[in-house]
Amino acid sequence: MTERSEGIDQHSGARGVIVVGGGQAGFSVASTLRGAGYTGPVTVLAGERHLPYQRPPLSKKFLTDPDGTRVELVPESFYRERDIDLRLGHKVVAVDTAVRAVTTRTGLRFAYDHLVLATGARNRPLPVPGAELDGVHSLRSFDDALRIGAALAAARDVVVVGGGFIGLELAQAAAARGARVTVVELADRLLGRALSPHLEAHLRERHESGGVHVLTGTAVSAIEGAGRVREVVTDRGRLPADLVVYGIGAVPRDELARDAGLAVDDGVVVDELLRSVTDPRVSAVGDCARHPHPGAVGLVRLECVQNATDQGMTVGRRLAGAPVRYTSLPWFWSDQGDIKLQIAGLRTGTDEVHVLSGESPERLAAYAFRDDRLVAVETLNWPAEHLAARRLLERGGPVSPADLAGSTLGVLARARRAAAVRS
Ligand SMILES: Cc1cc2nc3c(=O)[nH]c(=O)nc-3n(C[C@H](O)[C@H](O)[C@H](O)COP(=O)(O)OP(=O)(O)OC[C@H]3O[C@@H](n4cnc5c(N)ncnc54)[C@H](O)[C@@H]3O)c2cc1C
């Protein structure tokens, strides 16, 4: 990788596209630009020092099998061969939209024709005394996963604060490594509003029968220990702990945009083409972007690989000359031990849910409707059903709650055939 001197970047004598953030979305923008024939300079300014990597394995397989789990998205040669100028360890600290340039922490300035913000999200801090003790972690980056993986080797009592996707994945990984695990969740159910109640109850049962202790409706008020964590104090008593990992949500890294005077509202506000609503020379993608979506009520900000990848592709193609509105169907997965949870569509504002079970009792699907229209499908341990649901949702076929009444697979199959005939 080439080094650059201080001052405005001289690379190729042109400005081209600057991508801030070398994560899933930033990678997708850069690789799509080249794949779609963009010939101008492409520079990725990545705050981290690792090659762009995928985060999902960090809370799953990487914690139980770090040596056998590859996380890099592509090898370094990929960037060289495509003339993508990847600058690792280049954190951007300021954006000047008037002169169209960004400044890095080390004082380098890079001018751009178009700027793409792909800065992701950061973990919400745990607001209790003792959160700074040794042995208290949160998980977002590869380095976090290395630290947690090492701590798990010796941990006997693990407390996971937050019963969200990452917390539950971690709980299973810790249990698989032989620890006693307690999940403490403030709300009265796991996964907040992300999952319909029937599936949530089933999921909880699976975790508990697998040996994970789940406390919902429980608030953590402090973490105690002399330098190192010993106990977690909750409103229902004290829990012994030699490792605490918290996952209580994330906030978008949108401060660069805010400081540059771009519209921000829990994420960089963008239009259907994913351009900043304030400055069309700036786009935002992935976890940091708040965007309109045909399946959403109002603007949404999504935190999933599908969204980061597809938004990156949408912006890459637009900048290569093929603008399209961003309309991809959102989908998501979470592997919690041997439990596979998958969600297709957006379930906000749904008013009716129909639950179907597969031939095996371990397989469940919840079909969620808004105003009589199917808008989201959640599945447990049923990948084929998830894929079928995605096709159904992508096609936009009219499947009504009545089509699913009776809750049998035969009825669902007939509904699918009917949808296929009507579409
Ligand atoms: C532990 C974990 C498990 C997950 N599991 C799943 C899963 O199972 N399924 C799923 O769909 N999704 C999962 N996700 C979510 C998914 O990984 C994210 O939605 C996705 O990575 C978002 O991509 P992104 O590029 O927007 O952000 P990120 O991948 O977070 O990348 C943003 C990058 O920008 C860098 N950056 C930030 N600010 C600056 C700056 N000023 N200058 C330079 N660089 C900067 C950051 O350091 C970071 O490397 C998981 C996330 C985590 C943390």
Image: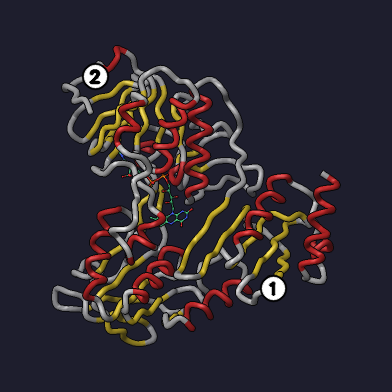
Residue 59 occupies quadrant: bottom left
Q: Give the residue number, with chain letter if any, for mark 2.
A: 8
Residue 214 at what x, y percent from top left? 44, 80
Q: Of the residues shown, which amino acid type is indicated by label 1?
A: Glu
Residue 216, above or below 34: below
Residue at 81% x, 44% y is: 423
Residue 8 occupies quadrant: top left
Residue 210, above or below 369: below
Residue at 64% x, 49% y is: 297
Residue 380, above or below 101: below
Q: Residue furthest front?
A: 68
Q: Could you give the CA–CA distance between mark 1 and mark 2, rounded to whole angstroms?
A: 63 Å
Q: Give the residue number, with chain letter if any, for mark 1.
A: 359
Q: Of callouts 1 and 2, which one flags the residue occurring earlier in the amino acid sequence?
A: 2
**Does residue 326 appear to the left or right of 229 in the view shown?**
right
**Does residue 193 appear to the left or right of 129 in the view shown?**
right
